[in-house]
Amino acid sequence: MARMTERMKELFQNVRTAVLATASQDGEANAVPVGAKRVIDEETILISDQFFRKTRANLEANPHASVMFWEGHEGYQFKGKVTIETSGPLYEETAAWVQALGDKAGFPLKSKGIVVMKIEAIYGLAPGPEAGRRLA
């Protein structure tokens, strides 16, 4: 497993939107913006599923995914294997959090499940000669 630095965790938490990339079992790529996300620990992130259709089908068929996020000239890509949870304490906690986000925004939101990624590799997205270098 790869471990996030404190700065990576901070940036992941604070960027408004990240991009979750998946592929179907036959290799068709898909990427979606995600906003309901958080750090579980230095090796694990969570993304709530409110609207996934193709993404969910891809993850069920092929549990490997990538998450990219950036701000200005600083950014990272996490690659790893995911699990999908639709019950249990972590899901229930996330469902309540997502509902509260929706209530605050005046838009009803309901979590259909959570995507939990164990980070296997971290790459830098900063422009320049080191772009794409594996960091962890």
Image (cartoon, helix red, strand yellow):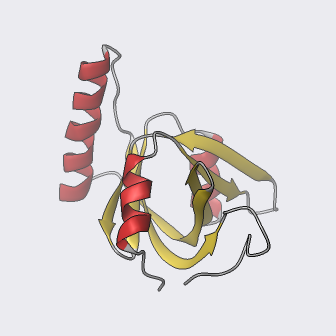
- In the rendered image, the vertical position of residue 63 relative to residue 14, given as above or below: below
Q: How many marks?
A: 0
Depth check: give the residue in front, 54 or 123. 123
Give residue 29's position: percent from left, percent from top. 78, 53
Q: Can residue 67 be seen at all in this image of the molecule?
A: no
Q: Can residue 61 be seen at all in this image of the molecule?
A: yes
Q: Residue at x 46, y 45 (%)?
A: 15
Quarter-of-image position of residue 78: bottom right
Depth check: give the residue in front, 12 or 98. 12
Q: Residue furthest top?
A: 106
Quarter-of-image position of residue 132: bottom right
- In the rendered image, the vertical position of residue 10 relative to residue 54, given as above or below: below
Q: Residue at x 63, y 55 (%)?
A: 73
Q: Residue at x 46, y 39 (%)?
A: 16
Give residue 89's position: percent from left, percent from top. 18, 57
Is 46 situated left or right of 131 in this image?
Answer: left
Depth check: give the residue in front, 98 or 89. 98
Give residue 22's position: percent from left, percent from top. 67, 56
Is 93 situated left or right of 84 in this image?
Answer: left
Is 26 situated left or right of 94 in this image?
Answer: right
Q: Residue at x 27, y 51 (%)?
A: 91
Give residue 50's position: percent from left, percent from top. 44, 35
- Quadrant, the C terminus: bottom right
